[in-house]
Amino acid sequence: MSRPLTQTEAALREEVVLAPHIRQEIDRSFELPTALLAGYFGLFLAYIGVMASAFSSPDLVIPYVVFAGFIVAAFAVPMAWVRMNPAKAKHALRLDELSRFGIMTETGKCSAGAASAQVLTLPILILCWGLAAAIIAAIA
């Protein structure tokens, strides 16, 4: 039959152990250069600018300001998150470090050009889509 063990009995049988204290280094940076991330969010802001200029209306001022505010927040919050690191052990790569060493991704090591292409492809396509929509609206 089973019976409950007291804390003393469990300690004598060495069934109670203290949890190990593990201090992990948290990498809050994505190791991408700040200039690359600024270009990433700058392209999104350029898209909002294209849309605001192509489809300007007094009724759309507030939505465009809100969209731009969300994009700025999406850039500012991760930047503040990286700066919260008290030890400052990790930092974002500089552009020259990225070009010399590349960056490790889930699929392996990438060169600076490959990493830049992976990061900037989507915002460039979205900006081109916005330009195409603005041109179509101007023609029609």
Image (cartoon, rainbow, N blue to C red):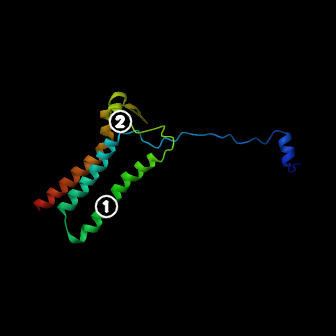
> For mark 1, does the 10 Å Cα neighbourhood hold few (<14), some (14 to 19), or many (20 or more) residues?
some
Screen quadrant of the C terminus: bottom left
Q: Residue type at mark 2?
A: Arg
**Image point (73%, 42%), residue name:** 18
**Image point (36%, 51%), residue name:** 75
Helix, strand, or loop for circle 2? loop
The answer to whether 41 appears left or right of 55 in the picture is: right
Where does the image place residue 54, in percent across and percent down from the top left?
17, 61
**Image point (27%, 63%), residue name:** 64
Residue 111's place in the image compared with 80, above or below, is above
Where does the image place residue 24, in percent across and percent down from the top left?
57, 40
**Image point (14%, 56%), residue name:** 135
Residue 42's place in the image compared with 138, above or below, is above
> For mark 2, does the 10 Å Cα neighbourhood hold few (<14), some (14 to 19), or many (20 or more) residues?
some
Q: Residue type at mark 1?
A: Phe
Which residue in the protein does label 2 denote? 94
Label 2 vs label 1: CA separation?
29 Å
Which residue in the protein does label 1 denote? 67
Where does the image place residue 62, in percent across and percent down from the top left?
28, 68
